[in-house]
């Protein structure tokens, strides 16, 4: 999808996440619960791309499945300073202390929404997150979500 089309309407985040989550979850053990979890996580990721404020380029969202893991690859135009911010945030996540950082972020007025989203995905969904630079103006988030494990 063209990024300008996606960012033209805030409701695209919710509509897209709900639609895709239902399609991906149809054959899971508890499809309704799986769809709700996936939709919430996906909506958070879509919101980050929506807030990139970059309209020039393509928005691509791909899904893969391996056993109990849903992989979301979200590629979108992203300014250099924002890419650096995401990379630094991810490095902090990999250093551990995700729960403590998450609690600090959600109680701080100075924290960014993107930090809260990334930490929330790790803490609430047990997500593993990677970032790939596709080219100079594009970023890809690779997010592995073990949603079936969360349902046990």
Image (cartoon, helix red, strand yellow):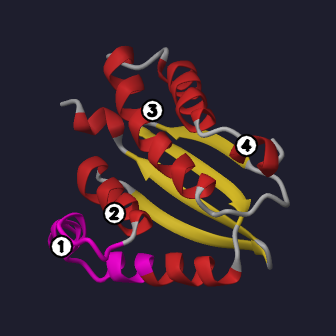
For marks 4 and 1 on the same chain, the one whose residue lies earlier in the sequence: 4
From the viewer's perspective, is the residue at label 4 or at label 1 nearer? 4
Q: Distance between the Cα atoms at labels 4 and 1?
A: 32 Å
Residue 89 locus on image (x, y percent): 42, 78
- Residue ID for mark 3: 39
Crowding at dot 1, Cα within 10 Å, few <14 / some 14-19 / many 20+, comes out as: few
Quick one: SS at disc 1?
A: helix
For marks 2 and 1 on the same chain, the one whose residue lies earlier in the sequence: 1
From the viewer's perspective, is the residue at label 3 or at label 2 nearer? 2
Instruction: Name the chief secondary structure element in magenta.
Output: helix
Q: Distance between the Cα atoms at labels 4 and 3?
A: 20 Å
What numbered label is drawn on residue 44?
A: none
Q: Are marks 2 and 4 in contact (CB under 8 Å)?
A: no
Vertically, is 33 above or below 44?
A: above
In the picture, measured across the screen, residue 73 lies left or right of residue 31, that is right
Q: Nearer the viewer, residue 46 or 149?
A: 46
Magenta stretch in the rendered image: 89-111
Q: Determine if the magenta segment contains residue 99.
A: yes
Crowding at dot 3, Cα within 10 Å, few <14 / some 14-19 / many 20+, comes out as: many
Residue at the image point whose x is 31% and y is 21% from the top: 33
Quick one: SS at disc 4?
A: loop
Q: Distance between the Cα atoms at labels 3 and 1?
A: 25 Å
What numbered label is drawn on residue 8?
A: 4
Vertically, is 112 above or below 4?
A: below
Crowding at dot 2, Cα within 10 Å, few <14 / some 14-19 / many 20+, comes out as: some
What numbered label is drawn on residue 116?
A: 2
Q: Distance between the Cα atoms at labels 2 and 1?
A: 9 Å
- The C terminus lies in which quarter of the figure? top left
- Residue ID for mark 1: 104
């Amino acid at each position: 999808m063209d990024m300008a089309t996606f960012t033209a309407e805030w409701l695209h985040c919710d509509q897209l996440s709900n639609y895709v989550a239902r399609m991906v979850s149809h054959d899971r053990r508890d499809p309704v619960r799986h769809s709700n979890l996936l939709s919430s996580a996906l909506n958070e990721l879509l919101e980050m791309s929506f807030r990139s404020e970059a309209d020039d380029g393509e928005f691509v969202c791909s899904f893969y499945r391996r056993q109990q893991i849903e992989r979301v690859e979200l590629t979108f135009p992203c300014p250099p300073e924002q890419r650096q911010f995401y990379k630094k945030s991810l490095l902090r996540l990999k250093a551990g202390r995700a729960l403590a950082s998450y609690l600090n972020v959600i109680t701080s007025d100075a924290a960014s929404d993107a930090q809260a989203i990334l930490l929330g995905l790790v803490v609430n969904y047990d997500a593993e997150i990677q970032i790939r630079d596709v080219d100079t103006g594009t970023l890809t988030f690779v997010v592995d979500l073990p949603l079936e494990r969360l349902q046990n």
